[in-house]
Amino acid sequence: MKPFDNIVSGLNFPNKVLAVEYSFEPDSDMMYAALLYSKGGEVNLQKTLGATSLQDLVKTLDKGIPVLLVFTGKKVLSKQINHPKEAGQEELAARAFPSIDRNGLFFQVTSLEDGDFAVSAIRKDVALEVFESFRGSGMEVLDAGIGTYSNWPLFRRCAEGNTIVGKYNVQLDDKTVTEIEEPEVETLLFNQSLESNYTASFLFGLQALAGKSYQGEIEVLTKARQEWKFGLLYSKGLMGLATLFFIVLLVSFLLFNHYNSSNAELSALTQSYDKQFRELEKLKSSYSEKNEFLQINGSQNSHTAQMADQMAALLPDKVSLTEMNFQPVERKLKKENLVRFSRDELQIKGQTGDYDSFQSWLKALRELNWADDIEIMGYKETDSKHSADFSIKIKLGDG
């Protein structure tokens, strides 16, 4: 990734975030924070901080760092819905909490595969109070996960062959996540050594930075993201205009002095003018490159949505998708102590009623202009009627 790519990417999604697990504990609220940054496609942990008060948490941090929250503890409700019929988020929330007034709650539904879902909820007034307290401290909350299942995709990856993930016990068979009463002090997650208490915040921040995406659809946070983006564009644009204005004034001043000098300085005047003209040409070229990068980067989200719509339109009746993962996180060698993600890759998992439907769908996918290569990662029949679970990997092209 070129250095300028980080700047362009940072205009749509932060390159540095403060991921905070906000835990509602019996005695007092506790905040476990992880400061992470992304550079050159790699996500790095800068430091961790723990505090019981927001004032203590932010006093050593620069104001304006975007915050990603994940709520846990006694004020968060979570329930697992096993093999529900086809339903939307509202219906799943109603099934999970039938006797609770859902108008006063924020919900988050997490797919656990195989038709299972985790539904988590928090009272709106509690969440909004936390958002406002961060804003009052000069820190804008851009995303919020509800409950420990917010980190389920990375829990599942970490728990392959090991049920202990930091301070959590993760059981993949029954899809449960429970907090260990006395975990090990230190843990190793994606080749990153850190204290176990920061497991949730580190994974939540890593998931967001690696995928350059938000989880929550809370209206107040969606508005905060737009305000953050436009504020960043405004500050950068204002700085650029001030720089350009200074250059114009400087050039005007130099030209005025040179044109009023004696005939003996005419040669020096010409050379100086030529130099300034070349500098302006370089600035114009640089501006065009920046504008082009902004246009390409700004169209990335719509291009992703278009690919998803095209695949959905091609699905046969007997084929269903359970997971679609753009730019998935991948591990590196332990010695490198870094995390990377695959930028031009799409991983899909799903179920099919028979092999012919599956092959027919693959054939249709291969005709899409953006699918350079399709690799079948796994295909396993689950019953005598030849139903099967499958997983494929698509190498994305420029189409």
Image (cartoon, helix red, strand yellow):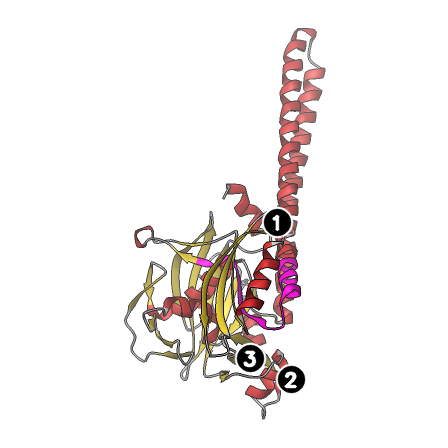
Give the mark, 1 or 2, whose residue is nearer the N terminus: 2
- Secondary structure type for disc 1: helix
Q: Position of residue 288 (x, y in %)?
A: 66, 37
Res. 103 mark: 2
The residue shown at (32%, 73%) is 164
Res. 2 mark: none
Single out the residue that lies furthest toward the bottom. 99
Is residue 162 covered in magenta? no
Which is more foreground, mark 3 or mark 1? 1
Alpha carbons under labels 3 and 1: distance apart: 36 Å
Q: Can residue 130 be seen?
A: yes
- Secondary structure type for disc 3: helix
Q: Position of residue 377 (x, y in %)?
A: 45, 61
Q: Crowding near pointer 2: few (<14 within 10 Å), some, many (20+)?
A: few
Q: Position of residue 367 (x, y in %)?
A: 62, 54
Residue position marked by numbered label 1 in the rendering: 297
Q: Amino acid at mark 1?
A: Asn
Q: Crowding near pointer 1: few (<14 within 10 Å), some, many (20+)?
A: some
Residue 324 to residue 238: above or below: below
Asked whether, in this view, residue 336 is left or right of residue 61, the answer is: left
The residue shown at (48%, 77%) is 147
Alpha carbons under labels 1 and 2: distance apart: 37 Å
Asked whether, in this view, residue 399 is left or right of residue 137, the answer is: right
Residue position marked by numbered label 3 in the rendering: 126
Q: Position of residue 185 (x, y in %)?
A: 28, 70
Q: Amino acid at mark 3?
A: Val
Choose between 167 and 95: the one closer to the eye: 95
Asked whether, in this view, residue 57 is left or right of residue 237, the answer is: left
Residue 281 to residue 267: above or below: below
